[in-house]
Amino acid sequence: MTPTKLYPRTALALLTALNLLNYIDRSVLFAVQDLVKAEFHRSDAAFGLLTSVFFIFYMCAAPFMGPLSLRFSRKRVIVAGALVWSGATLLTAVTTNFNQLLIRHTLVGIGEASFVILSPTFVADLFPVEKRGRVMGVFYLALPVGTALGYLLGGVMGPKYGWRAPFYAGAAPGVLLALLLLLLPEPPLGQFDTPESKTKDRDTLKSLFHNPAFLTATLGMAMMTFALGGLQVWMPTFLHRAHGYSLLDANIIFGLSTIVNGLVASLAGGWISDWLLRRTKSAHYLVSAVSLGLGIPAMCVALFASGRTMVVGIFVAEFLLLLNTGPLNAAIIDSVGPHVRAAALAASIFVYHLLGDVPSPVLIGYLSDKYSLRLAFVGPVIAIALSSAILFYGMRFAPPLRLQDESSPAQLPSGVSS
């Protein structure tokens, strides 16, 4: 394989591996939170607050990452953030009270902000536009798969070795992968973007507030994130409490479902939307809207059925929710120009976490305390319906894209010869 093809694929593999650890570090706590609760004696609402605090600091740090990358390069800021979040994850293992857990979540949120803001722009500059759906599907499959591996890591190690043990196992690889990233060159900014994407209508900060393609994709992502964020935090607990599964079995069921669907649906959604992109410019919006709409009845089965039917409902609902992973992220990236892309991702992340998984875990926890966890899950179903409707509306605003020939070689960064 020539260096022209090897470089972008190697960089994508390394960034995807780091993203995988990013989500493993986030979700380990979800798998063991009943064990932590038994030690620290806090309510469900308090444990929902942990996730909300993480995202508040994550959102507050995000707007600073674009300017930092202009001064120090995207690669160096990404590496620094990975070292911070890995160190904070290791510190979780030695916490002795709930307040220390809160402090840990603030540090992880700040560290992860750099990676989540800048790495998608890095990936977008590695491949041409017509491959972005499937490439983003690969990169973001780390979200469900990493989250699921966190469940499995915590679910297997927590009951056997104590809830602190999984945090030791999750911290060290992030340091190694971050240092390996330093060895790779950084791709030129916007090397595959067309001149049309670099106009003042799409490539300035002011344009973000008047860009309907960006705004509808972001709001659709926000509603989807509300649903997915709440379900990821509380679904193992739901299986444990409402259906009587052991903590280990609950995490294995949901973890395996998320791993399989994360791999299959994330890749399939990106491939389908890239294929449709040659037929309609709104392909990324269309695939996301349809998959979310079909997910509504599947979610109802997952929440209100029992036994095997309930397990099948969870599997199908997850598949349909995760099918939009690549297309929806590609829609956000394609909606803006390369020079404002980091700022756009920061703004998008701020909005979809503020409206999504910042309020949803604590709201579901509050409704669970007051009523039941099953009733609290009606909120995510409503959010999925809203997301689908917003994205159907957003199809009309999808920007035109100039597709390249599949055989066109990628431009190599300086220092990488062909």
Image (cartoon, grey):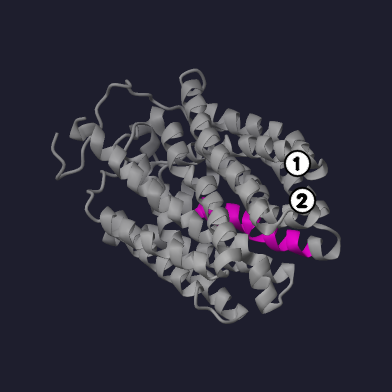
Mark 2: which secondary structure? loop
Look at the image and tell me whether residue 116 can be seen.
no
Specify the amino acid type for callout 2: Phe
- Left or right: 167 with respect to 318? left
User: Which residue is at the far right?
Assistant: 371
Give the vertical position of 351 relative to 398 (above or below). below
Please say if 36 is above or below 416.
Answer: below
- Residue under label 1: 302
Query: Which of label 2 and label 1 is nearer to you?
Result: 1
At label 1, the amino acid type is Ala
Q: Is residue 169 left or right of residue 44?
A: left
Measuring from the top left, give residue 297's x and y in whole percent: 76, 34
The residue lying toward the viewer, choosing from 190 and 130, is 130
The dominant secondary structure in magenta is helix
358 or 254, nearer to the observer: 254
Q: CA distance from mark 2 to mark 1?
A: 10 Å
N-terminal-most mark, 2 or 1:
1
Residue positioned 35% across, 58% down in the render: 78
- Provide the residue designation for mark 2: 377
- Is there any visible trace of residue 144 in the rendered image? yes
Q: Is residue 270 magenta?
A: no
**Of helix, strand and loop, which one carries label 1?**
helix
| The C terminus - image quarter | top left
86 or 161: nearer the viewer: 161
Q: Dot 1 surroundings within 10 Å: few (below 14), some, or many (20 or more)?
A: many
Q: Position of residue 155 (x, y in %)?
A: 59, 58
Which segment is the magenta one? 347-366
